[in-house]
Each structure stands twice: as structure tokens, then as C-alpha cells.
Image (cartoon, rainbow, N blue to C red):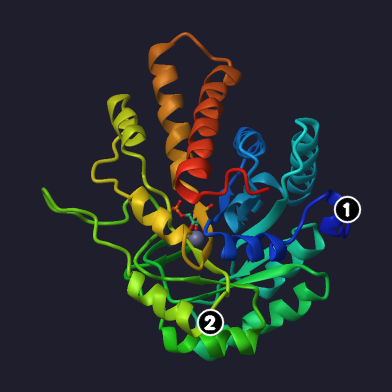
Amino acid sequence: MGDKVHYSELGLVNTRDMFKRAVGGGYAIPAYNFNNLEQLQAIVGACAETSSPVIIQVSKGARDYANETMLRFMAMGAVKMAREMGSNIPICLHLDHGDSFELCKACVDSGFSSVMIDGSHLSYDDNVALTRKVVEYAHAQDVTVEGELGVLAGIEDEVVAEHSTYTKPEEVEDFVRKTGVDSLAISIGTSHGAYKFKLKEGEQVPPLRFDILDEIERRIPGFPIVLHGASSVVPEYVGLINQYGGKMEGAVGVPEEQLRRAAQSAVCKINIDSDGRLAVTARVREFLAQNPGEFDPRKYLGAARKELIKLIKHKNQAVLGSAGKA
Ligand code: G3H
Ligand code: 13P
Ligand code: ZN
């Protein structure tokens, strides 16, 4: 374990102010997952260029991959990079899908400004108890906490859920009051990964359960809601991947119009990981297929980074509405 550091020393901010403005402003803060240098450069560069507040988020698996100490300095470097670009965008470093008190505590202690404790697979009472414990520890350091009610189908790190369970609106008030969380992730029909819906020939993606979202908003007005599993699974990238040797048949995500509608509601944080992965994979596959003699990682990762910048600018400007809100 590394030395203790508070996020404010790294130039980071928690989510409180970002969410307050987003809830009233009809847009959502983008939360982009990252594991490596090129992804982080692209996220911060694109958000600085579009003047968007941003949450850079790390899953448990990403933290193991990148190394806790390395992550701290990467986040500090991200803030410095934005400032050197002449941008003052707020940047939050967030733990995505924390699965234990110990992991959340370690992240608070190593400079994260926000953590998610995902007790959605536990019983309601155990979820409340675990979330409350994390909130008490995190709030003492002014670190904000995201909880989750309802289960998304798909893979969340090592946890695989076959079926989703929609959030029960009748539980949200009690959960928020008992736990003291700062934001709440809900389940309204999205799922993680690149295969969100199984569609038969000619079938359209079903609409998200906006009725459940509306009922949640009615019960906890103005409370920040988080939408996970919100990648669109951009068809152009799936096409490139399949064209250049990949095999991703049937990959499908949430249409952008639905995300735009969510961003205008109480949803004030939208999580995107898969689209970034697809952008990188598409351009790396294409580049290597077209340049078989090339072996400099800067070339193919540079092509991937360029695509990621384009994707993130588009999301901020045309989908989440966070561009210009920093
Ligand atoms: O919600 C899951 C995120 O996409 C993180 O995925 O656990 O493979 O890093 P990961
Ligand atoms: P996607 O797999 O749809 O990108 O969702 C990411 C996510 O919810 C991270 O927590
Ligand atoms: Zn998620």
C-alpha cells in the first residue's frame, strides 16, 4: 500500500458541485473508464477541448492492471495536462463498482475523490449497511459516494448477472436516507458490455424504462441519478472490427436518442467504457491490417487515441450535453 494522499493535493474534485449543476442544467457528466496512458490522454484532452467537466473512472480490474501508485500520478498528470492546455475543467477520479469497504477505503486513502460501492448483488439490508459504512469513511475525507439499487445484466468485473432486476422506485427514498449516498446508480434496462440486447432480424432496440426513472425522480426530486451500461456500441466500430479480423456479431448498444433523453432528466452521470474499447480496437485492427510491417506502438496506439478523442468530443457535444459546462 502506498502513502496516504488527499485528492485535493492532486488537483481533483469530488462530484458534489458537478452534479448540482448537471441536475439543474439538463445535461449529464461523462464518466469514462480508463486503464492506460492513451485512454487518459484522450479523455482529458477531448474534455479540455470541449470544456466539459469529467469523471475519469477506474474499475477494480483496471486498478489492478495499472497499479495504485501509478494511477495516482496519472490522475495528477491529467489535471496538469488540462491546465497546460489552458483549461480549468473539473476532474474527478472515481472508483467504478467498488465491491468491498476495504477497496473503497484504499481508494479514498490513495487520492480518489469519489467511490462507488456496488452492493446491488446483496440483500437490501446488507446493501444499506455496507453502503452506509463506506459513506461514513468517505465523507470524513469529503469524498463522494455512489450507491446502486437494482441489478444490471452483464459483467461487472468478476460479478456476472444473467438477468437484470429493475430498480424498485419504492426503495430509493429509504436507501438514500439511510445510507447518505451522494448519487444513486439505477437499473432501467441498460447492461454492461457490447451485447446489451438480443435482437431478432428486423427488431429495434427496446426503449429504456423511462417510466421507472420518472417514478424515481418523483420520489427523490433533484437527487443525482447514475446510468451505467450506457455505451451505444457504435456500429461503425463494430463494422471495422469485423472487417479487420474481429468477430463481434450481434453487438448492440443504447441508441444515442435514448441517452440524450436520459441526460436531460435526473440522470447526471453517464458511464461509458465499451465504446472507448471498441474505438481503440477498431483503429488498432485497421492500422495493423493496413500496415503489416509497422511495429511501433506509438503508431497504432496513436491512431486509437485519435479516434477516442473524436468519439469523446462527439459524446460530450451531441449526446450528454456536457460540452461548454465546465
Ligand atoms: O462496469 C464495468 C466496466 O466496464 C469495467 O470493466 O471490470 O472489465 O474493467 P472491467
Ligand atoms: P458500458 O459497458 O456500456 O460502456 O458501461 C460501462 C459502465 O457502466 C462502467 O461502470
Ligand atoms: Zn457500470
Residue underneath mark 2: 220
Q: Residue at x 75, y 30 (%)?
A: 85
Question: How dense is the environment of label 1, judged by Cα within 10 Å: few (below 14), some, or many (20 and up)?
Answer: few
Specify the farthest residue to the left. 201
Which picture quadrant has residue 51?
top right
Question: How dense is the environment of label 2, judged by Cα within 10 Å: few (below 14), some, or many (20 and up)?
Answer: some
- Percent across and percent down for residue 277 are 47, 40
Specify the farthest residue to the front. 25
> Looking at mark 1, is its residue's CB closer than 8 Å to ligand 2?
no
Label 2 and label 1: CA atoms lie apart by: 33 Å
In the rendered image, the quadrant that contains the N terminus is bottom right
Which picture quadrant has residue 296?
top right
Taking the image as shown, residue 69 lies to the left or right of residue 170, namely right
Image vertical order of residue 267 relative to residue 294, above or below: below
Q: Residue at x 67, y 82 (%)?
A: 180
Element assignment for label 1 = helix
> Looking at mark 2, is its residue's CB closer than 8 Å to ligand 3?
no
Q: Residue at x 40, y 52 (%)?
A: 193
Residue type for callout 1 = Glu
**What mark, if any, has residue 9 been given in the picture?**
1
Q: CB under 8 Å between callouts 2 and 1?
A: no
Of residue 282 and residue 87, the one placed in the foreground of this image is 87
Residue type for callout 2 = Ile
Is residue 123 visible from the viewing direction of this image?
no
Is residue 247 visible from the viewing direction of this image?
yes
Taking the image as shown, residue 282 lies to the left or right of residue 48, namely left
- Percent across and percent down for residue 240 are 33, 28
Total labels drawn: 2
Q: Earlier in the sequence, mark 2 or mark 1?
A: 1
